[in-house]
C-alpha cells in the first residue's frame, strides 16, 4: 500500500474484520493521491475468501480470479475522462442484484463519481436506497462537492490526504533517483503520484526551465513574448506560478509589497479563468498577468 494511505487501509480493513464495512463508501481527495490503489486493495479484501481479514491472501480462487481480471462478482466503471451515463449505472444495479457467483461479496467500483450525469446519479441513488445484502459500492471522487447531497449522505465518507509529507518524499525517492526540487513540494504533499509522473516524464526539467525563464524575465533578461510562449507549454502552469510568486519572488527582493498583494489577487483570478480559456485568449491572459508581475518590481 502507498505509505500515506496505509493507515486508512488499516482502518477500513478493521471495519471489514469486525463485519462493519459500510455498503457504500466514498473515498475523496486530490487526483494523483492514489485513491484507485486503495479502492482496488479494499475490493480485493472484500472478495477474498480466506480467514485472514487484514489483507487479501492472493491464493484463494477469488483472489486468483480478481488478479486475472475475471472475478464475476467485481464490476468497475471505466477510468476514462468521459461522463458516466445512466446505462452504466443501470448495468451496475443489475450486477448488484444478481446472486454472487462465488458465494461471497459483490463489489462495484465507480472511479471519479462526479462524472455521473444527473440521470446516472439518480439511478445510483435507487441502488443506494436499497443496498443488496453482501453488495459493496466503492466510489472515488476528486471533487465530491459536485456529487448530489443525497448521494453524499448515503455513503460513508473517507476524505484522504497526505498526512506526513516526508513519508511521500521518502517513497518518491525510492521510485526515482532524481533529486526532488523544492517546487515539487506542493505537488508531493497533495498528489504524490502526479509528482512521480513529473519525474518519470521529464516534466521536472520543463518546469525548472520555465521557472528560470520567469526569473530572467523579472530581471529584464528575457522578453515577455518568449516567456509567455515557453510558459504556456506547461500543463501545470498554475502550480508553477503559485510556487514562483509565493516562494521564489519574495527571495528575489526589490518589489513593492502593496503591489505584491494585488498581484496575488490577480493571480487567483487568473487561476480561476485559466481553465476556461483556450488558444490565443490563454496567451493574452498570461501576458496581462506577467506585465503586472513586472510592474511590482522597483
Ligand atoms: Zn484470497
Image (cartoon, rainbow, N blue to C red):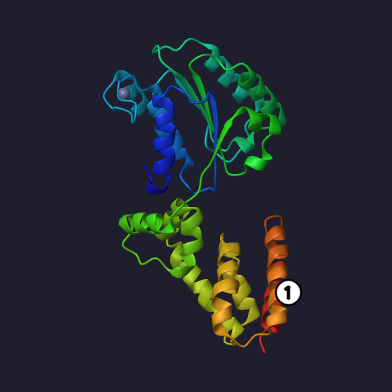
Res 284 quadrant in image: bottom right
**Image quadrant containing the N terminus:** top left
Task: Give the answer, above or below, for where 241 lies relative to 8.
Answer: below
Position of residue 267 in the picture relative to residue 210 (left or right): right
Look at the numbered disc 1 and give the secondary structure of its residue.
Answer: helix
Residue 291 in view of the camera: no
Position of residue 180 in the picture relative to residue 120 (left or right): left
Q: Does the residue labelled 1 lie within 8 Å of ligand 1?
A: no
Q: Nearer the viewer, residue 228 or 125?
A: 125
Residue 236 place in picture, x, y as percent: 56, 61
Residue drawn 72% across the image and 80% down it: 258
Q: How many marks?
A: 1
How many C-alpha atoms fall within 10 Å of the one at disc 1: few (<14), some, or many (≥20)? some
Q: Of all residues shown, which one is farthest toward the front?
A: 18
Residue drawn 55% across the image and 84% down it: 252
Residue 122 place in picture, x, y as percent: 70, 25
Residue 41 place in picture, x, y as percent: 40, 33
Q: Where ligand 1 lies, by image quadrant? A: top left
> Disc 1 marks which residue?
262
Task: Give the answer, above or below, for where 34 lies relative to 242.
Answer: above
Residue 254 in view of the camera: yes
Q: Which of 48 and 277 is in front in this view?
A: 48
**Image quadrant containing the C terminus:** bottom right
Amino acid at each position: 500500500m502507498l505509505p500515506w494511505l496505509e493507515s486508512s487501509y488499516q482502518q477500513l480493513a478493521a471495519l471489514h474484520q469486525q463485519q462493519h464495512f459500510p455498503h457504500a463508501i466514498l473515498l475523496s481527495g486530490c487526483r494523483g493521491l492514489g485513491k484507485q490503489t486503495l479502492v482496488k486493495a479494499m475490493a480485493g479484501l472484500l472478495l477474498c475468501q480466506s480467514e485472514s481479514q487484514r489483507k487479501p491472501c492472493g491464493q484463494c480462487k477469488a483472489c486468483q480470479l480478481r488478479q486475472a481480471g475475471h472475478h464475476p462478482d467485481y464490476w468497475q466503471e471505466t477510468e476514462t475522462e468521459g461522463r458516466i451515463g445512466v446505462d452504466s449505472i443501470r448495468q451496475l444495479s443489475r450486477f448488484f442484484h444478481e446472486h454472487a457467483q462465488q458465494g461471497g461479496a459483490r463489489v462495484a467500483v465507480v472511479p471519479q463519481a462526479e462524472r455521473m450525469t444527473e440521470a446516472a446519479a439518480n439511478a445510483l441513488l435507487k441502488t443506494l436506497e436499497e443496498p443488496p445484502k453482501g453488495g459493496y459500492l466503492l466510489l472515488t471522487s476528486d471533487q465530491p462537492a459536485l456529487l448530489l447531497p443525497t448521494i453524499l449522505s448515503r455513503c460513508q465518507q473517507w476524505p484522504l490526504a497526505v498526512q506526513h509529507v516526508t513519508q511521500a518524499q521518502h517513497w518518491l525517492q525510492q521510485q526515482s533517483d532524481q533529486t526532488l526540487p523544492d517546487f515539487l513540494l506542493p505537488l508531493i504533499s497533495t498528489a504524490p503520484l502526479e509528482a512521480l509522473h513529473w519525474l518519470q516524464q521529464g516534466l521536472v526539467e520543463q518546469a525548472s526551465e520555465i521557472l528560470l525563464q520567469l526569473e530572467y524575465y523579472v530581471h529584464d533578461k528575457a522578453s515577455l513574448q518568449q516567456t509567455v510562449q515557453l510558459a504556456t507549454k506547461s500543463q501545470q502552469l498554475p502550480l508553477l506560478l503559485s510556487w514562483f510568486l509565493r516562494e521564489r519572488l519574495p527571495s528575489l527582493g526589490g518589489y513593492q509589497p502593496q503591489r505584491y498583494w494585488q498581484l496575488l489577487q490577480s493571480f487567483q483570478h487568473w487561476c480561476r479563468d485559466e481553465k476556461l480559456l483556450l488558444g490565443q485568449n490563454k496567451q493574452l491572459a498570461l501576458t496581462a498577468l506577467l506585465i503586472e508581475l513586472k510592474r511590482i518590481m522597483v
